[in-house]
Amino acid sequence: MTTPAPAIDYTDKDFASLRTAMLRLAQQRLPEWTDQSPADLGMLLVDLFAYVGDIMLYYQDRIASELFPGTATERASIVDLLRLIGYELTPAAPAMADLLLTFPRPAGPRTVTVPSGAQFAARPPGAAAIEFTYLGPDLDLVLLSDQLRPGTGPDGRPVVTYDGLPVEQSRAVGPVLIGSSTGEDSQSFALPDASVVVSSVVVEVNEGAGWVTWDRRDSLLFDIAADGRAVFSHPEARYYQLLFDADGIGHAVFGAGRVPPAGLNNVRASYRVCQGTAGNLAAGTVTTALTTIDTLQSVTNRAAAGGGSDAERSDHAARYAPFAFRSTNRAVTAGDYEALAHSTGTVAKVRARSVSWNQIDLFVAPAGDTLVPVPEALRNRLVGYFEDKRMAGCLVRVLDAQPVAVDIGVELLVDERFVTDAVAGQVEAAITALLSFARVDFGQSLFQSEVFAAAESVPGVLAATVTGLRRHDRPAPDVDAELARHNLPPLAELPAFLRDAVTLDVAADGRIDVGEFEIAVLGTLDVTVRTTLP
């Protein structure tokens, strides 16, 4: 009776498992081979085959993982997979801000022009200047008109101010030569800079009689007209497509119809580049005018800049691409509006609400590290983005996400072996991180247990008591009035342990409720410390 061959275990994929399986098979096929010492030539061959098999199976598993967006780890794989469903990862987007311009109040009528392309800058300490540009048409300001508001400057002299000049964090580049056409189909030319603002790219081709501007299209096969019809490209159309690779480099891709004629250095591009999230500067930081504006006294941004984002992360794209694909570039449901808003790259969080059959409200938190109001330029851009996607007759409004300040008080019992101030600082950082912009979302409630966990996770904290947890917009309770309403003695006459209990400013259920269109932010944080008990 022959011994059956060992069953193949297809989960044996590592070196040790493969080596054991081969030795088990060798015992059945070569029973006379009994010397399995490390010095044996047969053992050397088994180890080598197990080693090669381990490497091959590892790469097979890696290849299989890269075939699905949910398991792929290489950004290039995510780009190629999502491109199959028509989803392109969003490149870097520029931050936007609204500037306040201050002029001395003139004695008589006077007009000042803010030219298109006027540049302003912020100068962060220890860093290069970050430029912001006004991209609208020339703006004529009549200083003694209702365009501006009268006021008083820091020196007590009368001034007039213009509030709301929309600027974008970007700088112009080019025209720069990006290649020489060979006259062949499907040529691709890389732009030399990263973080290119897509809407600013202009590609020109020297066709022999001078430079001719070609039109950018989302698809070289067809385009969606203003009335929603699909218009197919014709052979003589001067079209190109702008695609971004895994490194964020833009490529001007030409199709198989009309192609740039052969020539030396006959393809060039001009565009604007931005700094992504680095442009989301705090209020009061854009204070320098690089362009001379007549009689301009000062400039500043009263609100923080927002909307700047780096190239879309792979995990974000894998999460939102299916929603955008199901929307098929049309916004019908609230989920469609939210998915399409995320695909712009300028939005960190968004929630849609239908208040009537013909109106959609989008509550938007611009991309950035903190919750800021939506800059007017970004608001207009989002409204324009949905113009060809919304249902006919539907009005889209872009509103600011509503911040809810949460006041928190914590009393710590600190181990005497630790530095008290250092422990308190770490607890403040842990609670601040609990309500960081990246961790909160619309309608996300805050629980007392989360504050406990954040405080007690810090080394050196023996115990923590949450002494305060309430919305800043809710008035603090009048403890004496509540005690009197229940026919109890005043607060000062209560025993110490009862006085400590009733003065805790914490909701009965230990929960801060946040509305559907609200986002929790940290209000006041009070961390007090007492040392360990003897």
Image (cartoon, helix red, strand yellow):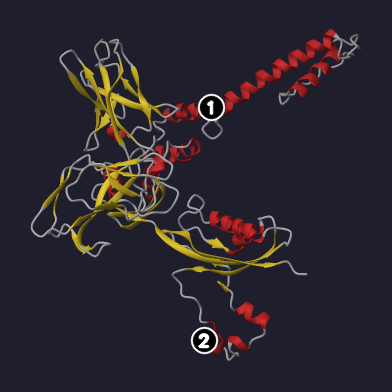
Q: Amino acid at mark 2?
A: Ala
Q: Residues within 10 Å of mark 1 (few under 14, many from 20)?
A: some
Residue at the spot x=45%, y=28% of the render? Answer: 247
Q: Is residue 426 left or right of residue 12?
A: left
Distance in Å between CA atoms under marks 2 and 1 = 66 Å
Kindly give the residue lying farthest to the left in the view shown: 109
Task: Give residue 122's mark.
Answer: none
In depth, the one of 169 and 103 nearer the eye is 103
Whether the residues at callouts 2 and 1 have beta carbons within 8 Å, the answer is no
In the figure, 400 relative to 7: above or below?
Answer: below
Camera sees residue 170: yes
For the image shown, how many numbered marks are present on the structure?
2
The quarter holding residue 116 reads top left
Q: Which residue, given by chain and number where applicable, does mark 1 sit on? A: 67
Counting from the top left corner in percent of width and height, residue 263 is at 25, 10
Q: Residues within 10 Å of mark 2 (few under 14, many from 20)?
A: few
Mark closer to the observer (2, 1): 2
Q: Earlier in the sequence, mark 2 or mark 1?
A: 1
Q: Is residue 426 left or right of residue 221?
A: right
In the figure, 41 relative to 317: above or below?
Answer: above
Counting from the top left corner in percent of width and height, residue 393 is at 23, 50
Residue at the spot x=46%, y=63% of the render? Answer: 405
Counting from the top left corner in percent of width and height, residue 356 is at 30, 58
In depth, the one of 375 and 184 nearer the eye is 375
Task: Give residue 481's mark.
Answer: 2
The quadrant the C terminus occupies is bottom right
Q: Amino acid at mark 1?
A: Leu
